[in-house]
Image (spheres, rainbow, N blue to C red):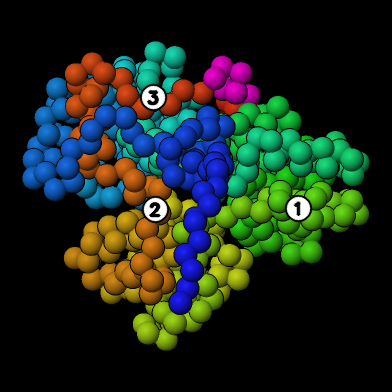
Amino acid sequence: MTTAHPVQELDVQPSPLALLLLGRDADPRSERGVECPGDLPSPSDPDLVERARAAKEKLGEKVFVLGHHYQRDEVIQFADVTGDSFKLARDAAARPEAEYIVFCGVHFMAESADILTTDDQKVVLPDLAAGCSMADMATAEQVAECWDVLTEAGVAEQVVPVSYMNSSADIKAFTGRHGGTICTSSNAKRALEWAFEQGQKVLFLPDQHLGRNTAVRDMGMTLEDCVLYNPHKPNGGLTAQQLRDAKMILWRGHCSVHGRFSVESVNDVRARIPGVNVLVHPECKHEVVAAADYVGSTEYIIKALEAAPAGSKWAIGTELNLVRRLANRFAAEDKEIVFLDKTVCFCSTMNRIDLPHLVWTLESLAEGNLVNRIEVDPETEKYAKLALERMLALP
């Protein structure tokens, strides 16, 4: 027979991080957001498409809808333009007559659009919880601490920061303040070449894989030229001598989608589909990039498939929404396009932007209610824009 003991209630308060992950709090210096205010339409509402169309028509030229390549088809159908994050931000800047920029993407993309558009334009993100796990892997406080470590090692004056477009406005501003530039997956080599003309070392943020692949595959460096800075370890887990010897100081960050592809995925698809061409994004691990036939940005992947001969076979290592859209698009041309991994993997945060959120956003704007505005403070915007302008000036 067991004796029941009274349950002692513990006064346990959830940590700020736990609340953030649950969507019950907000951190303006983080990519993670919160639940949208107001009531969203039911996802089973059969009139959602018509409601979105009617609200967009009512807004007319006052609204400009941007759709990232990784968005769902149900959202992409309402995009005025599609593209990668930087192309979309520039498209928004080229439409000064649009009062509202509805960015169907993730938080850092909307921030970039706000930085590049006029003060009169209002950038809106349909779901504030659409963040980016990669961008979250480098906070302003962590990067400032890293710079202190580089200073103590006596190398900070030799270091030029290069930050991937997939970073928060805070990180872009840090880059601008310290003489660095932004890069995309399309121009990372040019950005690194420029950086090495300015200094002897590069601090590459926040995606280690794009930095490593560009340095080793495209610029002829060795893996030994690269060190990995881990913000969760004292001094980044590195000695002062390691920092002095390194050419590339890579931040320990990665894309949760592209990071899942493996050499086993490549070997498996080659065994299943004889003659297949393996095409992967440079955010994939170095060993995956080395095993692939072709490597390139999202725009490169699209153009490669457009130029591919009929009857060719392709396994694509990037986000599934885009792969599926390309497979459907080129099926009539007898191009076989498959996802590189057997396990289906969408970008979970990108997929937060769905039709109910888009309808709620457009209807709110049509009724004169500004919702989910993304606004970068003037000081951060000043230095982030400086870093972006350095990229735009690259030859």
x, y percentage for residue 337? 32, 69
**CA distance separating discs 2 and 1:** 28 Å
Q: In the rendered image of this protein, does residue 173 appear above or below residue 14?
A: above
Looking at the rendered image, the quarter that the C terminus falls into is top right
Element class at badge 2: loop
Instruction: Look at the magenta stretch and give its main secondary structure.
Output: helix
Left or right: 193 in relation to 301: right
x, y percentage for residue 348? 39, 53
The answer to whether any part of residue 307 appears in the image is: no
Q: Is residue 324 magenta?
A: no
Q: Earlier in the sequence, mark 3 or mark 1?
A: 1
x, y percentage for residue 173? 63, 29
* Magenta-highlighted residues: 377-383
Query: What residue is shown with label 1?
Result: 233
Q: Earlier in the sequence, mark 2 or mark 1?
A: 1
- The amino acid at mark 1 is Lys
Element class at badge 1: loop
Q: Please rate how many residues cluster around mark 3, counting C-alpha atoms within 10 Å: few if below 14, some from 14 to 19, many from 20.
A: some
Which disc, if any, is residue 348? 2
- The amino acid at mark 3 is Arg
- Looking at the image, the residue that sits furthest to the top is 120
**CA distance separating discs 2 and 3:** 21 Å
Tell me the mark number nearer the camera, choosing from 3 and 1.
1
- Between 239 and 121, the residue placed more toward the observer is 239
Q: In the rendered image of this protein, does residue 96 appear above or below residue 30?
A: above
Q: Is residue 381 magenta?
A: yes
Left or right: 319 in relation to 221: left
- Between 79 and 214, the residue placed more toward the observer is 79
Q: Earlier in the sequence, mark 2 or mark 3?
A: 2
Which disc, if any, is residue 373? 3
| Quadrant of residue 291 within the rendered picture | bottom right
x, y percentage for residue 217? 64, 62
